[in-house]
Amino acid sequence: MHRIFTTSVASVYPHYVAKVEKKGRTQAELDEVIAWLTGFDEPALRAHLERGTTFEDFFAEASLNPHVDQITGSVCGVKVQEVEDPLMRQVRYLDKLVDELAKGRPMEKVLRS
């Protein structure tokens, strides 16, 4: 089991916020991206952050967007579509979307609309 699986989403979330804000994006946009991927609305996301939900439990409770197969590209030199472990692939989907948001990609493209 990879260490990220037992890490709380709340411990990583501030790093996601800092990353996107440093590039001129907002926490609201980050939350929109997370909602698109997981199906968690604002109150549900806040509840997970407050509870300290692990990535494993976070994605177990998520209803992944049916268009996640459109998320392609590399994160840390690894193509997300080639990650074999389903949970690790889901974590990489989130990482990829955060990277795209931080790089200034238009929200319509980040959300695959």
Image (spheres, grey):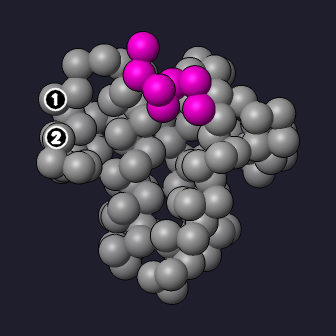
Q: Is residue 42 left or right of residue 58?
A: right
Question: At 36% across and 62% down in the image, what residue appears?
Answer: 99
Q: Amino acid at mark 1?
A: Glu
Q: Secondary structure at mark 2?
A: strand
Which quadrant would residue 97 be assigned to in this image? Answer: bottom left
Q: Position of residue 113 (x, y in %)?
A: 38, 57
Please say if 42 is above or below 93: below
Q: In the rendered image, which quarter is residue 82 located in?
A: top left
- Quadrant in which the N terminus appears: top left
Separation (CA) of disc 2 from disc 1: 5 Å
Judging from the image, what secondary structure is the residue with disc 1 in? helix
Marking on residue 79: 2
Marks 2,1: beta carbons within 8 A:
yes
From the viewer's side, name the closer residue of 68 and 81. 81
Residue in view at x 83 percent, y 33 percent: 51
Residue 4 is situated, as x and y percent measured from the top left of the image, at: 48, 31
Q: Is residue 22 magenta?
A: no
